[in-house]
Amino acid sequence: MLKLQIGDWIVEPELNQLSAAGKMVKLEPKAMAVLVYLAERPGEVVSREALLGTVWPGVIVSDDALTQVVIKLRKALGEGYIQTISKRGYRLVAPMGPLVESAPAPAQPGRRIPWRVAAGIAALLLVAAGAWWVWEERALVAPGQTAIPAEAERAAQPTVTVRPFEALGNDPDAALLARGLTADLMTDLSKLSGLSLIGVAPLGEPAAAATPAVAPPIRYFVSGSVQRVDDRLRLHVHLTDAQTGKPLWSERFDRPLSGFFAIQDELGPKILQILPAKVSEAELRRMAQRHTRNLEAYETFQRGQAALLVRQKAENEKAREMFRRAIALDAAFARAYAGLALTHAADYRNQWTEDGAAALERAFELARTAREINPDIRETYWVLAFVHLERREPKQVLRYLVTAVQLYPSYADAYAFMAGIKTYTGRPAEAVPLMRTAMRLNPEAGYLYFLILGRAYLALGDLEQARVNLEHALRRNPEDLETNIYMAALHLAAGDKHAAAWKADEIRVLQPGFSGRRWLETHPLTDPAQKRRLVQALAELGL
């Protein structure tokens, strides 16, 4: 990965970040695009029109948008880097250093790359950076061109899982921290291209009776316990060789609660010192980034996450309140904005609000805000994909999901989401291998994975496989409306009208006054053939 030196700063366009003397600064994608464009022309005056036309192609924006970006760049870089030329534009006046790779060869003393050569290479960087800053205006991912890791490549990687950390005692706050530690460590490890992270079921949940994909054997697992004692946090973490049962590393942390995030910063790198995984410098830096340093905001966010996962109206409103509180405590908490966006998207999808259009627009606004705050968080791409799904924009959905798995190669939910999109848009055969990947990475997945796979097999006409997976989904969540609807359609397709009628009665109990036509208004299925069959099934069942 190429880096560009501007003055004292090392610029990494692909990561949207600057670093100098141990300090790291994140930039918004638009700000990075402006900086790279100026760096391509060091010392030259670049007009506002040229910048607006390049960084915001085909989009009408006010001059204030560019002004705000320049202000942010100056705040990040410091004074003396970008000069305003009255009535003409801007120019980069800082000295340009040599471009280097992530692992540079020894430099020859005193030798610099001529600025015209640097400018030419910077032009290539600008094209690479386009993957970040022209998504919504220009870039499209064509079917079959999703640059996701190959299965053969994954097969050779060490496999690791993080078992849910145990909260000692009956302290609900310790349980929140334990859940957060587990989830965040898994997120950190999923950023690494050199290992394959395998998900496990949370404590207290049954293991899957069967899965349609063979999960690879787990070679290493991380486990731990969390205890809060007054204002101190005690954490005991273990890394174990799963094949031999031999402990490879263990450490006790006894810190003030204020040291919680410092512990998180240490865990990933310490574990990676033991694991035989190839990790780049950039990946290590991304792993070290924390989403918030406010412990109260973090705990409030975890409460919101727990409520959001229930997927019921009352809990959705509770989650929204928790996310709002977290944002009030930390205005730059991108994950809280992403969670808040999901609550509004859920209002639209489940028709929990009279103004569904306004809810969807609010979700879109919040999701974009989350990404602007921190474009390196996987949830921001997943949430943006979900909102675009509800907006019936499948190309944009796939674009964000592909980026999510490029950033987080072990992100099972992104593969599952891709599979769902393939079925919705009439390509269910492509959904099945994606779901195999998702279930291999998360063999103890919840009901949604089985629903997605069941939908795909139903669209393919494989009624037996559809039945197996929809039954798995119902065992995990018997009250999910969509799973029951597809199971009713499956019974009709199999000619079992009695079972279909029974399932239709269950649907009416789950949602009195259910209207299939109204339900389909916010359902993202766009394939005409599947939609026609579903409408016919609902009509035959009196729904």
Image (spheres, helix red, strand yellow):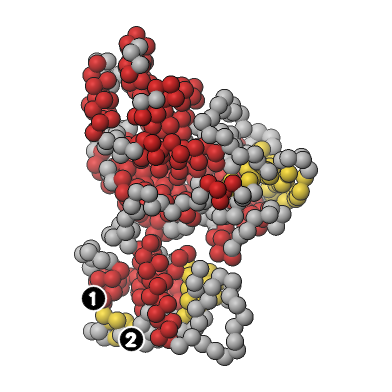
- Which residue is at 53% across, 46% downward? 151
In the foreground, 82 or 483? 483
205 relative to 352 in the view: left or right: right
Callout 2: SS: loop
- Which residue is at 38% across, 32% downward? 456
Callout 1: SS: helix
**Residue 498 higher or lower than 394, as above or below:** above
Q: Which mark is residue 49?
A: 1
In the foreground, 423 or 47? 423
Q: Residue furthest front?
A: 152
- Number of callouts: 2
Upstream in sequence: badge 2 or badge 1: 2
68 relative to 231 in the view: left or right: left
The amino acid type of the residue labelled 2 equals: Glu
The quarter of the displayed image where residue 526 is located = top left
CA–CA distance between discs 2 and 1?
14 Å
Q: Which mark is residue 44?
A: 2
231 relative to 320 in the view: left or right: right
The quarter of the displayed image where residue 289 is located = bottom right
The amino acid type of the residue labelled 1 equals: Glu
